[in-house]
Amino acid sequence: MTATTAAVATPSANPSGKRPDRGPRQRAERREAIALVIPALLPIIVFSVIPLAIGVALAFTNATLARNAQIEFIGFDNFVELAGDIAFWDSFGIGLVWATSVAVLTGVCALALASLLNSNLRFKSLTRIIVLIPWAMPPVVTGIVWRMIYDVNAGPLNAVLAWFGLGPVNWLGDFSTALPAVIVVGIWSGLPQTTVLLLAGMQSIPTELHEAAAMDGANGFRRFWHVTLPGLRSVLIAITSIDFIWNFNDFGIVYVLTEGGPGGRTMIPPLFTYLEAFRNGEIGYAAAMGDVLVVAILLILSLYIVAQFRQQKEGRS
């Protein structure tokens, strides 16, 4: 009998197709692994999963902050009302402008700053420390400092304009300047961490690639365009996407600077939701807004994940 015939004729060791029973040692190792993972999962479940589930459930109720209010299930009434809420959808558009502008411009500025820090710059260590200062400031402190800078009467920014004979500008109180002024603060606040990540990405690019490009006669700009940028592509996309999601969900700086004014010009969706819940007391309606924001973020995140999978697939092929 040939080997092939023997292989065909030999009955399968597990004809039922069921997985073989784990031995005592494997079961013990599995229990140990689960026991080690549980302490890490508990904070996530308690502080993330459970509040998220409660928030989703509240969106289908008429919950308010009124004393002794009776919470009743009202189905999709909050979502139907939200679909026609022009003020919320206006804030949604403002939020997209805010998050996109801050994420993209922060990426561009951080790329330039990281390139500078990656060069043979004098006092490089001191410069890096100065760059990290905004990172150490809480959002509330950042907002207060920039409110002082933008102050129409005593702010240093208007004092500089006065030296050039220009009149004072109400940066945070004018419809045409409020949103750009807030975007500048968002860029300033997010610049350090983005710069640090891009600098780490630049330093991971092999120096041999730059040396080979220089030997081929490429100048500094061409080396940056053909070596540095391709090497930072995945890092830059990831950082920009994370910055977008973070800024779209965060409202601390905007709240301290303008509280959504003037006239709702800087009213981003998280701030709108916060004010609806804790100023107007409409918890159920605000929860419906939060659910819409979660879905929007998940859609954006899914687009990023799909793009990453396609990039990895192209890289393997």
Image: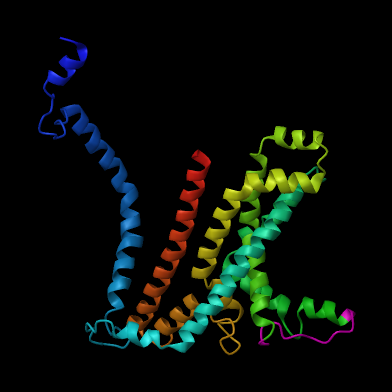
Q: In this rendering, would 257 be left or right of 34?
A: right
Does the magenta segment cover residue 167? yes
Q: In this rendering, would 100 be left or right of 310?
A: right
Which residue appears farthest toward the top when viewing the image? Answer: 1
Q: Residue at point 29% right, 88% down?
A: 67
Vertical comparison of 21 with 221: above or below: above
Res 238 seen here: yes
Name the image quarter holding residue 158. bottom right
Q: Residue at point 47% right, 44% down?
A: 313
Q: In this rendering, would 136 be left or right of 68?
A: right
The quadrant the N terminus occupies is: top left
Vertical comparison of 166 with 232: above or below: below
Q: Picture coordinates of residue 4 (x, y %)?
A: 21, 16
Name the image quarter holding residue 96. bottom right
How was this image coloured? rainbow
Q: Which of 174 and 137 is in front in this view?
A: 174
Q: Residue at point 34% right, 55% down?
A: 43
Q: Which of 187 and 298 is in front in this view?
A: 298
Tell me the chief SS of the magenta region: loop
Name the image quarter holding residue 149. bottom right
Q: Picture coordinates of residue 44 (x, y %)?
A: 35, 56
Does the magenta segment cover residue 97? no
How many numbered circles does the render carry? 0
Q: Picture coordinates of residue 241 (x, y %)?
A: 54, 59
Vertical comparison of 269 with 299: above or below: below
Q: In this rendering, would 283 be left or right of 225?
A: left
Q: Picture coordinates of residue 312 (x, y %)?
A: 49, 45
Q: What stretch is highlighted in magenta?
A: 163-175
Q: Residue at point 68% right, 56% down?
A: 110
Vertical comparison of 205 with 165: above or below: above
Res 268 seen here: no
